[in-house]
Amino acid sequence: MSATRATTAVDTVQGAIVFTDLAGFTEFTAVQGDEAALELLSIQERLINLEMGEHGHIVKELGDGLMLWFGEACDAVRCSLAFQDEFERRSSAQNTWRRRARCSSPRQRRCKSATSSPTSPSRRSGRS
């Protein structure tokens, strides 16, 4: 008797995954309380959706972080940098929730921005 192998058709999709994280969120929740923590998560989600637009979507919420999907790696990088900048700008204006947002992606291809290169030292430093 010969063994037969079942085959399944698989479609390959290329894209980019981004993970976000709010630095110090556990401490923030302990000090500020659950209501403030939920508001901060809501702000994160609103900013991500604003920066992401139609270029990606939220796949999963992971505690204080999000897992995002983008069809193009360049869109993932642009959204991540814009989100971090806007989150940190708003955070620095607040006395109660001064926090830093981190974004990471396992793999990216190079892309160029009209204003600056995403690999320039000013855009890389302090980013996770």
Image (tube, helix red, strand yellow):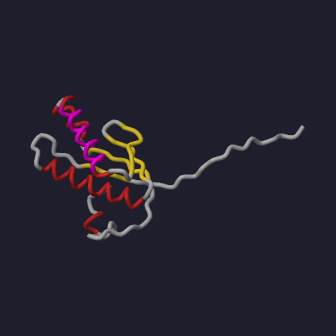
Chief secondary structure of the magenta span? Answer: helix
Where in the figure is residue 25, as x and y percent of width and height? Answer: 25, 39
Total tally of numbered discs in the picture: 0
Q: Nearer the viewer, residue 66 or 55?
A: 55
Most distant residue in the right direction = 1
Residue shown at 26%/58% (left/top)? 126
Kindly indicate the quadrant of the structure image that contains residue 23: top left
Where in the figure is residue 18, as x and y percent of width and height? Answer: 39, 50
Q: Nearer the viewer, residue 87 or 13?
A: 13
Q: Is residue 6 left or right of residue 72?
A: right
Residue shown at 87%/40% (left/top)? 2
Magenta-colored stretch includes residue 48? yes
- Magenta residues span 36-50
Residue shown at 25%/67% (left/top)? 122
Tell me if residue 37 comes above or below residue 52 in the rendering: above
Where in the figure is residue 50, as x and y percent of width and height? Answer: 27, 48
Q: Is residue 97 left or right of residue 61?
A: left
Residue shown at 37%/38% (left/top)? 62
Most distant residue in the front direction = 54
Where in the figure is residue 125, as x and y percent of width and height? Answer: 27, 62
Location of the N terminus by quadrant is: top right
Tell me if residue 123 comes above or below residue 101 in the rendering: below
Location of the C terminus by quadrant is: bottom left
Q: Nearer the viewer, residue 97 or 85?
A: 85
Kindly indicate the quadrant of the structure image that contains residue 63: top left
Tell me if residue 20 comes above or below residue 72 in the rendering: above
Magenta-colored stretch includes residue 25? no
Tell me if residue 87 comes above or below residue 107 in the rendering: above
